[in-house]
Image (cartoon, helix red, strand yellow):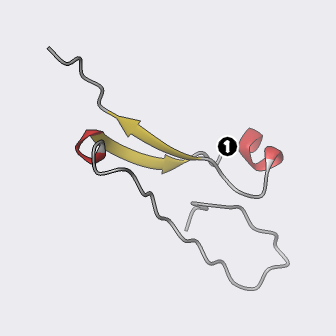
């Protein structure tokens, strides 16, 4: 399984990914997707990966 919220040391015996994306009810309908950036740059920056929401933005008329 790919890392979703953090990356792990080979010394760790068990991976425990927990993925929750909590958004306000006002924008919940705009959420198009969610993902974690598991790039090398993200892994080097922290032991927690950034969680990204893709939002569909619209202009109010």
**Residue shown at the point (75%, 67%) measured from the top left:** 8
In the picture, the quarter occupied by the N terminus is: bottom right
Q: Is residue 27 left or right of residue 21?
A: left
Residue 2 left/right relative to 60? right
Residue at mark 1: 39
Q: Is residue 6 above or below residue 54?
A: below
| Farthest residue, direction left | 61
In this rendering, the count of numbered labels is 1
Question: Viewed as shown, does residue 34 lie left or right of 39?
Answer: left
Query: Which quadrant of the view contains residue 31?
Result: top left
The outermost residue toward the bottom is 13
Neighbor class of circle 1 (other Cα within 10 Å; few <14, some 14-19, many 20+) is few
Q: What residue occupies the far right of the structure in this picture?
A: 11
Horizontal placement of 60 versus 49: left or right? left
Residue 22 in percent (x, y) is at 42, 57
Residue 18's x, y, as percent?
54, 71
Instruction: Pinpoint residue 7: horizontal percent, then vertical percent.
Output: 71, 62
> Taking 48 as reference, is 28 above or below it?
above
Q: Helix, strand or loop at disc 1?
A: loop
Residue at the (81%, 69%) spot, across then down: 9
Nearer to us in this view, 4 or 30: 30
- Above or below residue 15? Residue 49 is above
At 44% across and 57% down in the image, what residue appears? 21
Q: Quadrant of residue 26?
A: top left
Residue 48, image x, y percentages: 71, 57
Image quadrant in which the C terminus is located: top left
């Amino acid at each position: 399984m790919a890392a979703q919220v953090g990356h792990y040391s080979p010394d760790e015996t068990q991976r425990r990914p927990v993925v929750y994306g909590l958004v306000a009810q006002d924008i919940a309908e705009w959420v198009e997707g969610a993902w974690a950036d598991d790039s090398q740059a993200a892994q080097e920056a922290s032991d927690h990966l950034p969680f990204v929401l893709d939002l569909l933005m619209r202009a109010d008329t």
